[in-house]
Image: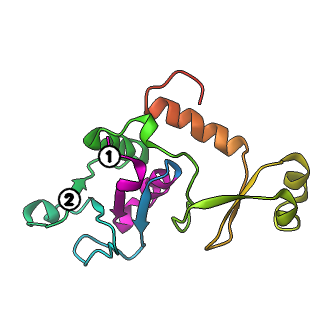
Amino acid sequence: MTSESEICFAAESTLGKLAKWLRILGFDTSYEPGFSAEKDIDSGRKKRILLTRTERVLDCKLSQEFIFIKSNNPFEQLREVINTLGIIYTDTRLFSRCIRCNTHIEQVDKDSVQGNVPDFIWETRDIFWKCGRCRRIYWPGSHTERSHDIIIRLFDRHDKL
């Protein structure tokens, strides 16, 4: 498979959870709630793979590569994308993007987030990341562990991440 930076997606408005999980895996995934396959895709400077559930797309001659998503389940949808493109675990960059705005997140000094995270979190965690665009702050926690468990099953990995 190609490197993570080369795989970019544009997800239709019905695929919000899929877009979130692709971002968790580290893939550049454009997602706008009002977006549909019938509208022009704002691909910017990147060629994006369209993720769609719109059956009319199957009959159109799109100049853009697309994956028709069949499942209603977000994790099965994710598996469809992974299997279609042959993505393997080493193609991912886990937790490297903001799940809200798709921007790369950067590790920040603990003191810089004091007062912006719950006191208990600030007192019990030492590592924090921040989105430079929307300013959302991330830290490792039980949600990260649950996500790792899902990812292990997703890629049929039985070793620890």
Structural crowding at the residue carrying mark 2, measured as other residues with C-alpha within 10 Å and reported as few (<14), some (14–19) or many (≥20): few
| Marker disc for residue 132 | none
Q: Secondary structure at mark 1?
A: helix
Point 41% across, 67% down: residue: 30
Q: Magenta stretch?
A: 1-23
| Marker disc for residue 81 | 1
Structural crowding at the residue carrying mark 1, measured as other residues with C-alpha within 10 Å and reported as few (<14), some (14–19) or many (≥20): some
Q: Residue furthest top?
A: 158
Q: Quadrant of residue 50?
A: bottom left
Query: Which callout, 2 or 1, points at the residue further toward the start of the chain?
Result: 2
| Marker disc for residue 65 | 2
Query: Relative to the observer, which residue lies in front, 64 or 54?
Result: 64
For marks 2 and 1, give the CA distance.
Answer: 12 Å
User: What amino acid is found at the position of numbered circle 1 in the picture?
Assistant: Val
* Residue 94, horizontal then vertical, whole percent: 55, 45
With respect to residue 158, does 70 lie above or below? below
Q: Secondary structure at mark 2?
A: loop
Quarter of the rendering occupied by the N terminus = top left
Front: mark 2 or 1: 2
Query: Relative to the observer, which residue lies in front, 42 or 15?
Result: 42
Q: Is residue 20 magenta?
A: yes
Point 85% across, 60% down: residue: 118
* Residue 81, horizontal then vertical, whole percent: 32, 46
Q: Say left or right for 153 vs 59.
A: right
Point 88% across, 67% down: residue: 115
CB within 8 Å, label 2 to label 1: no
User: What amino acid is found at the position of numbered circle 2 in the picture?
Assistant: Glu
